[in-house]
Amino acid sequence: MNAGLQKAAERKFGWIERLSRGRLVILILFWLIVGVHAVLYFNAEPCWFTLPERAGAWADTIYGERRPPECQCIYQVGRIHP
């Protein structure tokens, strides 16, 4: 077998493997961001929990004006709504 051809093929497959791993990492990060945004959105109405102050600052940094409005919880965290 041609050694040069085999080496070129191994190099090409190495790049394909790196790109597919990078794509997986980006996909996981994307769905993580979608999940966080969904929790922020659905929490705005029934107010299941109050975000910690630091998490709220991160959400403001990431979403800015598009961030769902923060709910004003009158119930204590961890209690079931009546």
Image: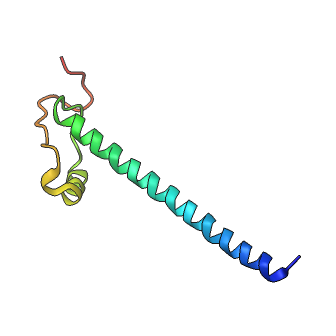
Q: Residue at x 68, y 68 (%)?
A: 13
* Scheme by which the image is coloured: rainbow
Residue 29, x across and y down, in percent: 41, 54
Residue with the most extreme top position: 82
In this view, the residue in front, 26 or 50, is: 26
Q: Residue at x 17, y 49 (%)?
A: 67
Residue 57, x across and y down, in percent: 20, 56
Compared across the picture, whether 34 is left or right of 69 comes to right
Marks counted in the figure total 0
Q: Residue at x 25, y 52 (%)?
A: 55
Res. 45 image quadrant: top left
In this view, the residue in front, 6 or 32, is: 6
In the displayed structure, 57 sits above or below 68; it is below
Residue with the most extreme right position: 1
Residue with the most extreme bottom position: 4
Res. 1 image quadrant: bottom right
In this view, the residue in front, 24 or 13, is: 13
Q: Residue at x 78, y 78 (%)?
A: 5
Q: Quadrant of the C terminus?
A: top left
Residue 39, x across and y down, in percent: 28, 39
Compared across the picture, whether 54 is left or right of 30 comes to left
In the displayed structure, 78 sits above or below 81; it is below
Residue 19, x across and y down, in percent: 55, 65
